Image (spheres, helix red, strand yellow):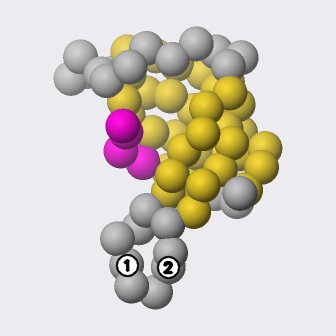
Amino acid sequence: RGRCKNLSHSGIQFITENALSEGKSVEVTIDTRSSKFKPMKARVDIIRVEPSEDNNYKAAGIIVEYK
């Protein structure tokens, strides 16, 4: 689980409780909780992970595939 902080067509930054590994791929579901947009799945290659101030992790990745 995570909370999106920044999203573009090609990348995403999110906060998570899990220490992800740089270079790994994860599948994410992006849910805006808006009736205008359905949740979408994407495969993300993690390029950066750093601790955040609230004992979570800031992860950034490149969206390599929409599903």
| 33 in relation to 1, above or below | below
Query: Which residue occupies the foreground of this view, 52 or 63?
Result: 63
Q: Which residues are magenta?
A: 1-5
Query: Which residue occupies the foreground of this view, 3 or 35?
Result: 35
x and y percentages locating residue 59 in the rendered image: 50, 28
x and y percentages locating residue 3 in the rendered image: 35, 44
x and y percentages locating residue 11 in the rendered image: 66, 46
Describe the element under mark 2 as helix, strand or loop: loop
Q: Residue at x 38, y 19 (%)?
A: 18
Relative placement, left or right, of 22 versus 59 is: right
Locate the C terminus and report the quarter of the image it occupies. bottom right
Q: Amino acid at mark 2?
A: Phe
Identify residue for label 1.
34
| 16 in relation to 19, above or below | below
| Res. 37 mark | 2
Locate the N terminus and report the quarter of the image it occupies. top left
Relative placement, left or right, of 14 versus 40 is: left
Q: Amino acid at mark 1?
A: Ser
